[in-house]
Image (cartoon, grey):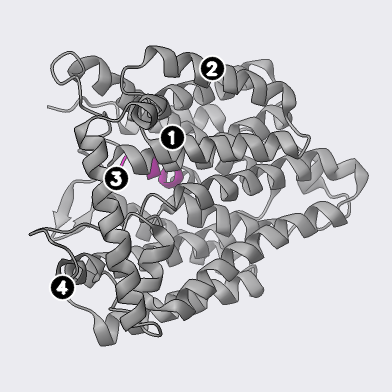
C-alpha cells in the first residue's frame, strides 16, 4: 500500500530528475510506478475476493468521458494526441487503483496525508528555486521541478482543504503540527508561483468555506497569512493582478486570442471537436501568430477537442461527485458526522477551487482533480452506520509518507 501513497505524494514532482527519468522511449520511472500500483491493486482485489469497483453514476460518467477521448484519439488523433491519450489512460489507472485500494477510513486518511505531504514537498522545491534564482532573474516564477507554476498552484489549492480536514481528524499534537507545517509551506509556495488563477481559486475556496459556516477559525488566519505574503513577495499573484508588467499583459492578450480561437473551433466542430490533443495545432489557423499554445481554459479545451457532448459529460461528472459528497453528509449518523463531514467538506472545497482554477489552465489532465473524483466514489462505499472502519483512526502513515518521500528524493540533482 505504501507504493500507492508514494505515487500520490509524487504527483507534484512533475519534472523531478529521478521520477521523470526516461527508461525506454517515453516510459518514465513514475509511469512504471503507476503500472506496479495498478497491478498490486488488481491482485489485492483478487486476493480478497473483492468486488469493490463501484459502478455508480460517477463511475459511469467517467467511463463515458474516457470512451469519448478514446474514440477521438482513434479516429481524429494525430501525433499531438498521443500524450493526452496517455494521460487519460493514466487517469483511468488512478481511478481504478484508488477504488480498489482505498477500502477503509484509515486508508482514506492516509491518502489525504500523502497528497498534502507531496504538495508541500514540491513546495520546498519552489521555495528553494526562488532562493537560488530570484536575485539573478527577478522576473522568474519558480516551478521547474513541479512542472509549471500555474499547475502547481492548482494542485496546491486542491490539496490545502485536505490539510484543514486533517486538523480535525488528527489526535496527536505532533501530527497536527506536521499537517500545519505542510499547509504553511504549501501556502508560501503558492504565493511564490505568482499564479493569478491559483489566487482566485484559493479565494473561491475560502469564501465557500466561510459562507458554509465551517472552519472560521482556520480560514481567517489563512487569509491573514496570504495577505502578509502578498505584501512581501515581489511577484505575488495580487501584484501581477494589480500592477501587470508587459509580459503579464501580453499573456492576457494571448489568452483572449486563444479564447476566440477555441470558440471558433467549437462552432465549426460542435459534436466531435477537432480531436484529442489537437487544439494547439488547430489554433494556428485562427491566430495571427506563428506559434500556439494549449487553450489555458479547461472547459474550452474539452469542448473544442472532444465536442460539446463531452463537455456536458465532464460537467455532469463533477456535479455527480459533488452530489455524492452532499448525499453522504446528509445520510451519516450524528456520531460519525465530525469525521464524514470534515472529509466530504474538504473534497467539496477542492472541487470549488478546481472549478475556478480550470478557467485559467488546461486542467482536464490534472491528477489531483481525478484523485478527488475517485475519492468521492470511494466515500460512497462507506456505510452510514457506525463501523470500526470509521470509528478507528488506524495507524497513521503521515510520517511514513514523509520518510518514504524524503528517501526517494534525497539524492541531490547534479
Question: Which residue appears at 46% of the width and 28% of the height?
Answer: 402
- The image's mark for residue 225 is 2
Name the residue carrying label 3: 252
Residue 320 falls in image quadrant: bottom right
Residue 79: numbered disc = 4
State the CA–CA distance, disc 2 to disc 4.
45 Å
Q: Which of pointers 2 and 4 indicates the residue nearer the eye?
A: 2
- Disc tally is 4
Q: x and y percent of residue 60 in the render?
A: 58, 77
Structural distance between the alpha carbons of marks 3 and 4:
29 Å
The structure residue drawn at horizontal position 54% and vertical position 45%, both measured from the top left corner, is 353
* Label 3, label 2: how far apart the Cα atoms are: 27 Å
Q: Which residue is mark 1?
A: 119
- Comparing labels 2 and 1, the label whose residue is closer to the camera: 2
Using the image as rendered, state which of residue 267 and residue 26 is in the foreground. Answer: 267
Which numbered disc, 4 or 1, marks the residue closer to the eye? 4
Q: Is residue 314 left or right of residue 394?
A: left
Q: Earlier in the sequence, mark 2 or mark 1?
A: 1
Amino acid at each position: 500500500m505504501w507504493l500507492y501513497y508514494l505515487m500520490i505524494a509524487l504527483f507534484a514532482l512533475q519534472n523531478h530528475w529521478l521520477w521523470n527519468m526516461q527508461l525506454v522511449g517515453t516510459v518514465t520511472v513514475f509511469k512504471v510506478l503507476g503500472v506496479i500500483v495498478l497491478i498490486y491493486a488488481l491482485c489485492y482485489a483478487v486476493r480478497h475476493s473483492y468486488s469493490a469497483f463501484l459502478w455508480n453514476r460517477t463511475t459511469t460518467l467517467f467511463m463515458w468521458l474516457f470512451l469519448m477521448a478514446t474514440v477521438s484519439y482513434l479516429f481524429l488523433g494525430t501525433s499531438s494526441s498521443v500524450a493526452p491519450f496517455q494521460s487519460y489512460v493514466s487517469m483511468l489507472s488512478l481511478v481504478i487503483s484508488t477504488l480498489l485500494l482505498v477500502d477503509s477510513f484509515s486508508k482514506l486518511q492516509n491518502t489525504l496525508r500523502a497528497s498534502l505531504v507531496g504538495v508541500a514537498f514540491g513546495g520546498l522545491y519552489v521555495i528553494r528555486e526562488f532562493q537560488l534564482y530570484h536575485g539573478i532573474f527577478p522576473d522568474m516564477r519558480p516551478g521547474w521541478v513541479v512542472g509549471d507554476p500555474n499547475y502547481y498552484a492548482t494542485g496546491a489549492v486542491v490539496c490545502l482543504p485536505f490539510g484543514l480536514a486533517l486538523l480535525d481528524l488528527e489526535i496527536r499534537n505532533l501530527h497536527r503540527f506536521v499537517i500545519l507545517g505542510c499547509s504553511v509551506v504549501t501556502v508560501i509556495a503558492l504565493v511564490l508561483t505568482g499564479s493569478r488563477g491559483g489566487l482566485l481559486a484559493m479565494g473561491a475556496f475560502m469564501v465557500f468555506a466561510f459562507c458554509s459556516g465551517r472552519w472560521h477559525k482556520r480560514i481567517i488566519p489563512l487569509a491573514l497569512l496570504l495577505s502578509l505574503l502578498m505584501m512581501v513577495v515581489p511577484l505575488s499573484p495580487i501584484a501581477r493582478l494589480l500592477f501587470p508588467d508587459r509580459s503579464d499583459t501580453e499573456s492576457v492578450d494571448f489568452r483572449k486570442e486563444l479564447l476566440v480561437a477555441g470558440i471558433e473551433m467549437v462552432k465549426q466542430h460542435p459534436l466531435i471537436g477537432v480531436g484529442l490533443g489537437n487544439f494547439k495545432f488547430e489554433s494556428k489557423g485562427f491566430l495571427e501568430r506563428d506559434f500556439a499554445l494549449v487553450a489555458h481554459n479547461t472547459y474550452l479545451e474539452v469542448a473544442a477537442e472532444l465536442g460539446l457532448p463531452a463537455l456536458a459529460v465532464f460537467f455532469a461528472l463533477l456535479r455527480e461527485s459533488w452530489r455524492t459528497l452532499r448525499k453522504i453528509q446528509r445520510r451519516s449518523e450524528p456520531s460519525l458526522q465530525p469525521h464524514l463531514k470534515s472529509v466530504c467538506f474538504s473534497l467539496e472545497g477542492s472541487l470549488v477551487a478546481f472549478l475556478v482554477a480550470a478557467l485559467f489552465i488546461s486542467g482536464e489532465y490534472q491528477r489531483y482533480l481525478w484523485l478527488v473524483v475517485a475519492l468521492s466514489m470511494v466515500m460512497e462505499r462507506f456505510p452510514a452506520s457506525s463501523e470500526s472502519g470509521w470509528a478507528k483512526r488506524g495507524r497513521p502513515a503521515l510520517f511514513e509518507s514523509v520518510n518514504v518521500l524524503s528517501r526517494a528524493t534525497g539524492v541531490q540533482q547534479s
